[in-house]
Image (cartoon, coloured by chain):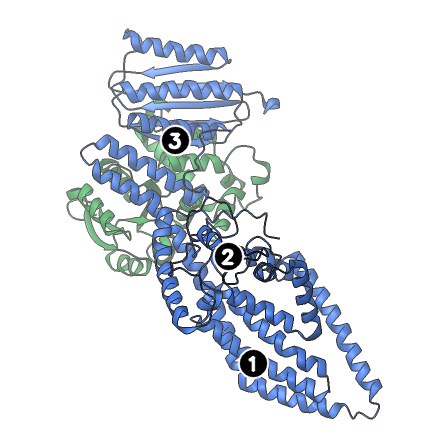
Chain colours: A blue, B green
Amino acid sequence: MIPGRTLIGPPCHSGMSLMAVAPEVRDHRGIAEFTDSGTTVPRAPEPTVPSTTSPGGGGDGPRRPDDGRPDRGRRHRAGRRRDHRGRLRGPVRRSAETRVLAGVCGGLAQATGIDVTLVRIAFVLLSLGSGIGILAYALGWLLLPLEGDNTTIFARAVTDRRGLRLVVAIVPALVVVQVVAGALHLGYLGSASWPVFLAGAAAILIRRNASEDERVWINDDVLPMLHTNSGRQGRWSLALRIVVGAALGLAGLLALILGHPTGAAFRPIAGSLLVVAAIVVVFGPWWLSLVRDLLAERQARALAEERAQMAAHVHDSVLQTLALIQRSADDPRHVVRLARAQERELRSWLFDGRPPGTIGDEATTLAEGIDLLQRQVESDHGVTVQVVVVGDSPLTAGVRALLDAAREATVNAAKWSGAAQISIYAEVEPTAAMLYVRDRGCGFDPDGVPTDRQGIARSIRARMARIGGSAVIRSAPGRGTEVELSLPLNPAAR
Amino acid sequence: MSPGGRPRIFLVDDHAMFRAGVRAELGDSVEVVGEADEARAAVEMIGERLPDVVLLDVHLPGGGGVAVLSGVMPHHPEVQFLALSVSDAPEDVIAVIRAGARGYVTKTISGTELLQAVERVGAGDAVFSPRLAGFVLDAFAAGAGPGMVTGVDPELDQLSPREREVLRLIARGYTYKEVARDLGISAKTVESHVSSVLRKLQLSTRHELTRWATDRRLV
């Protein structure tokens, strides 16, 4: 059921939508003009506007009546006034609200004023009786525009050459069924197969040319019902199909043999088999090539999607950063900062599989905490922080304090040492966590008294002492500084 | 070495900009005997020109740095390889080391440090960046039960306490000289420890290492 579905389109990066959507919109316009001159599709009263429900713009689908959209969908509804009997006037449209499948019945009910349930019952009866109902429904789906949409699926389908070839490929199959039905005097099968096959052809065109929203819905909600997916469910349905098929086939053969003990029925069967074989020989290679084409098309589409995603990411992150870097070429520290931040993001995307922009600000382990520390110090102070972490530990109160002390030492080095690079090394062992912050900057004499530094050193030591750890600071003028922090870990508590 | 005692190096990297950058940074201290931007051409040209050291990008068209290593090493074991990468994914790094590179440094390395690394690799020693040292410590973490595959030589599957100390100092950002001073040993001893770790890294069947390799479908 659709009415409750909230249609939030796929996240669409600005870059991607620019690249991917523009040509589609153009296509739509082209097709819409074709429709103007070439078909009897019911048309909206206004001039053609390119569809905003084009692929990529799936965010504002037509199925949400009150999504605040100021454009066509609204105006259509406003333009279609109800007459004195409560009917909606204007061209027949598939209903966006009253729908089980595609809204054809709902649309007809609205246009005629007949209760939608009656319309539905009529369709079901027509379908069971002769198959005409199915065909009529498929044609309605194909030829009626959805409420709020200006183009029909058919308008797009006429340019879908591969889809049309698929439709043509169905014809021989229909001939086969007709021949078999004729040979076996199965009148019902013969007469009902026409509309069903034509509806099947329409279904192919619908599946391939529906608007993006509808296609998403077909793929997500309708096709899974057929259990065509692989996986456990697919295997079960395959087993079920085989069992049911075998039972039906066996029953049919038995009925034939029992009904015609002389074997007279087998002559028409043999005849129709020959015709079937002939058709397969003639059309088989073509069908195979169609299947190959379809597979290739699907692969190409997947590839294109992947590429678009890649392009979107590169556009949003790398290209933006490069532009920023060009603009701030006279500020080397800023450039380094930008480049480092971008590098980190790209790395986390490429190697950790994290989507862009999701490097969390919340750490849950020591390693993540150090990552965060690295990011902040690098962006705040424009230095490079090189991090090596061996092992990891959850973020306990002690580890948090260790991180705080490490941050103080790192910021201190960034501010005062003058070194362009600071190294952090952390190692978690079963009984202790060790963390080293090292720079190769100016260093200082721990026994001399530059009071500001002593204060910081004292604060780091006090911090570590409070959690039962220790801090050792080694430094000499001109030889850089190293702060060694150690935190005993209780193996049982880890 | 060429007559002037300068190491003869060969650059393999698919980024022309990076190759030019390395040339400029190393300047006259080395003799660049050739460049290649993909694996097959690299294997061919290295075989012809026989440089002392190949600076090898980890990611390359045509099979990556590993393809170059496996193409050259069997025929010219005297050529040494130093891997360079912007990628720090452990499996990438471990893969090139296990394929035969004698060192690994990141592309953000400074010109002087790179020259030192080239000279060290050229002399047959190993070059470990802090990152690589961290990876190795991680892979050889002590007491990892399931990590111990009963290999041919159990010695290969663990680091000695001294090797561990050396690697830890390298991971902390110490140079070999600083490591030597800190541990009270000679720089030569540090180098031999590092080379021994490299050998273990290449030959060990430790689960962590083989898993990294399997993840990359290298085994």
Q: Nearer the viewer, residue A41 or B210?
A: A41
**Callout 1: 10 Å neighbours few (<14), some, many (20+)?**
some
Do pointers 2 and 3 mark residues of a single chain? yes
Q: Please tell me which of labels 1 and 3 falls first in the chain.
A: 1
**Which label is found at residue A354?**
none
- Left of A226 or right of it: where is A142? left
Residue at position x 62%, y 89% in the image? A275
Q: Position of residue B116 (x, y in %)?
A: 25, 37
Mark 1 vs mark 3, CA separation in Å: 67 Å
Q: Position of residue A151 (x, y in %)?
A: 45, 62
Q: Amino acid at mark 2?
A: Glu
- Left of A154 or right of it: where is A277? right
Q: Position of residue A91 (x, y in %)?
A: 50, 63
Image quadrant of residue A422?
top left
In the rendered image, which residue does mark 2 sit on? Answer: A147
Do pointers 2 and 1 mark residues of a single chain? yes
Label 3 near label 2: C-beta < 8 Å? Answer: no
Residue at position x 43%, y 44% in the image? A351
In the rendered image, which residue does mark 1 sit on? Answer: A171
Which residue reaches farthest front? Answer: A84
For the residue labelled by badge 3, is the local secondary structure a helix, a strand or a loop? strand
In the rendered image, which residue does mark 3 sit on? Answer: A387
Q: Please tell me which of labels 2 and 3 falls first in the chain.
A: 2
User: What is the chain letter for disc 3?
Assistant: A
For the residue labelled by badge 2, is the local secondary structure a helix, a strand or a loop? loop
Q: Position of residue B150 (x, y in %)?
A: 58, 44
Q: Amino acid at mark 3?
A: Val
**Callout 2: 10 Å neighbours few (<14), some, many (20+)?**
many
